[in-house]
Amino acid sequence: MWTAVGILVLIVVVFGFFILKRLYTPNTLVKDDGYVFVPTGSSFDDVVRILKAEQVLRDEETFRWTAV
């Protein structure tokens, strides 16, 4: 019984570590002196498209996931 609980806890901890690592890894490549112009009224998809066009977005999937 305790072995199963221990294995379950270990799985949850490892899974949680990978999720936190993905959430807290920088997702953009903007330098300190750089900027990206986003026009007023742009939708979220427009922003993603602009970031991809400027080659600033590192991982679109996690960007979308954390932005929701």
Image: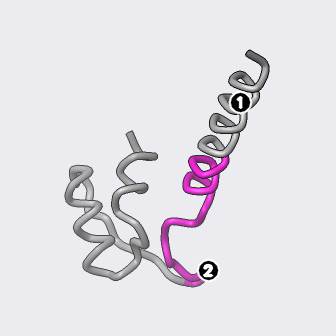
Q: Is residue 52 above or below residue 41?
A: below
Residue type at tag 1: Val
Name the residue rendered at 21%, 50% in the picture. 43
Tell me the CA gap for discs 1 and 2: 40 Å
Q: Left or right: where does residue 58 sit relative to residue 16? A: left
> Which residue position is annotated with label 2?
32
Mark number for residue 9?
1
- Horizontal side of residue 49 vs 59, given as left or right: left
30 or 62, which is in the foreground?
62
Q: Is residue 19 above or below residue 27?
A: above
Per the image, is 11 magenta? Answer: no
Judging from the image, what secondary structure is the residue with disc 2 in?
loop
Q: From the viewer's perspective, is residue 13 above or below residue 43?
A: above
**What is the span of residues highlighted in magenta in the rendered image?**
17-33
Instruction: Identify which residue, 55 or 43, lies in the foreground.
Output: 55
The residue under the point 42% across, 55% down is: 62
